[in-house]
Image (cartoon, grey):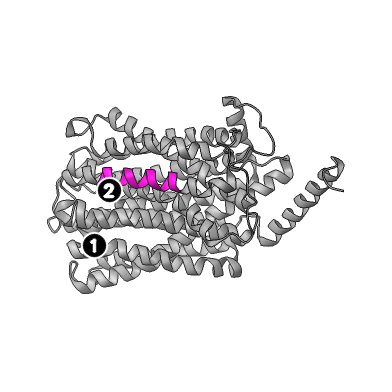
Amino acid sequence: MTIAATRIPHPLPMRLKIIHGFGAVAFGVKDTGFSFFLLIFYNQVLGMDAGVVSAALLIALLVDAVIDPILGNLSDRTYTKWGRRLPWLYAAPIPLALMWIMLWSPPGGEAPSFLGLLAIAISVRALLSACEVPSVSLVPELTQDYNERTTLFRYRYLSGWAGGLLMMVLAYTVFMPGPEGLLQQDGYIVFGIFGAILMAVSVIGSAYGQHKLVAHYPANKPEPFSLGLAFSEVREAFSEKAFLIFAAGGLAAYISQGMTFSISNYLNLFVWQLDRNALIAYPVVLFFSVILMFFIVGPMHQKLGKARSAAYSALVSMALICVPYLLFVAGIWPQVGTLPSTVLFYAFTFLANTLGVVVMISASSMIAEIVELFEERGGRRAEGVFYSGNWLVQKCATGFGIFLTGQIVSASQLSTGALPGSVATPVLNEMVLMYLGACVLLALFAAFWLLRFPIDRADHEARLEKLGQLARADATQEGLVP
């Protein structure tokens, strides 16, 4: 049954913002699984070498990054009575849920081969992309307003973090509680099943909630899909100067995020020696840092613009990350595992993560402005192409971040099956210093390029006015308006 198109109200109602954002819960579940738990699960629980696991995850991300432009182009060229995006959002979630369960319950209950892990990881990531690329590509279609787009991404990030942190809380309290639980296999099976259900519900529920507004044939029937055309459009995206500048800054920021997330459980267990209660508090601290981001990112964009908000936040976040570890290495940090150590560490983590999320949400919102720049120069919109290009950058970078963690853990000679409190100080110091060195270099690189992003609010609004004038002129010529 075709549901007639409904005019999208402006400003966007709160209900629509929440429903649209709810679809990002699946991405948060995936991010928490891949970034926080997958490496330690396959390394410390199933016994695979950390370097081998991180290499498999990196290759999976690189393959997925190549798949993303194809999915973005297919999404842009989907022509159905339900629009361009909804068919994908209804078709992909169930297969995604099944593959997610397999990732945490490998056949036979034992560590798969390198190729087996690679195949499962590629399948999960490709199916998640088939949900996320069409969903995020709806943002420029829902609104052209500079601030409203930031608001939509605020809700997407809030929902994504909420889904991911819910999984983390349940992991630390129900599925694999305490430091010992993280080293036991049974809890990861239930972790996978619950996450699969949550993923499917979020994507399908969000799509259904937006159905009446976006379920209609696109205004213009696109050209048929071809593989050559898909990659030619990606080449067009990467020939856009604004996108290249964004990609350079985003690349470094995403690598840093991937590395920080994937190494966090190693650092929390072996450096800070967090007990069960402290581990439970960790996702709570992260959640409230995202709440703080929700309230400060809008004013920051108003005062500084998106690019400077991202660049300055990257630098300050890096500094806040470094301080506790430098004091630890210098031997002047409170005794790890004690309440003063944990509280102080969480205070720095709270502020650092708040600004780290500001970097991510600012960068994501910047993509929407590139869409109109491309439309002005090329005469057509290509939301899916640019967002899939962003995913290409993000996934390559995140994969490399996880790969860096694997190499750092291997180079530090942390043994498989190590217990908190039993690891020698030189091993921990080496792990920490390699991690901090990478953090500093990546933050400086990200800030350098993000500050050079060429589109600000004034440019965007002037471009929208010009595109509106062209659209009105075309409509007049075609006799659509008097």
Depth check, mark 2 against mark 1: the one in front is 1
Q: Residue at x 66, y 42 (%)?
A: 381
Residue 4 rendering spot, x and y as whole percentages: 62, 43
Q: Which quarter of the image is occupied by the N terminus?
A: top right
User: What kind of secondary structure does the magenta stretch mostly adopt?
Assistant: helix
Magenta extent: 191-205
Residue 415 rendering spot, x and y as whole percentages: 16, 46
Query: Is 168 left or right of 202, judged from the image as shown?
Result: left
Q: Which amino acid type corresponds to the residue marked 1 in the rendered image?
A: Ile
For mark 1, give the secondary structure.
helix
Please identify the residue farthest to the front as the structure is shown: 1
Query: Does 306 appear above or below 63?
Result: below
Separation of marks 2 and 1 at Cα, in angstroms: 15 Å
Query: Does 12 appear above or below 216?
Result: below
Q: Earlier in the sequence, mark 2 or mark 1?
A: 2
In-front residue for pair 278/92:
92
Residue 438 rendering spot, x and y as whole percentages: 38, 53
In-front residue for pair 104/428:
104
Q: Residue at x 19, y 48 (%)?
A: 414
Does residue 193 show up magenta in the picture? yes
Does residue 57 show up magenta in the picture? no
Residue 160 sits in quarter: bottom left
Q: Residue at x 33, y 57 (%)?
A: 165
Q: Is residue 22 visible?
A: yes
Q: Which residue is mark 1?
A: 280
Say which mark, if any, is on residue 37: 2
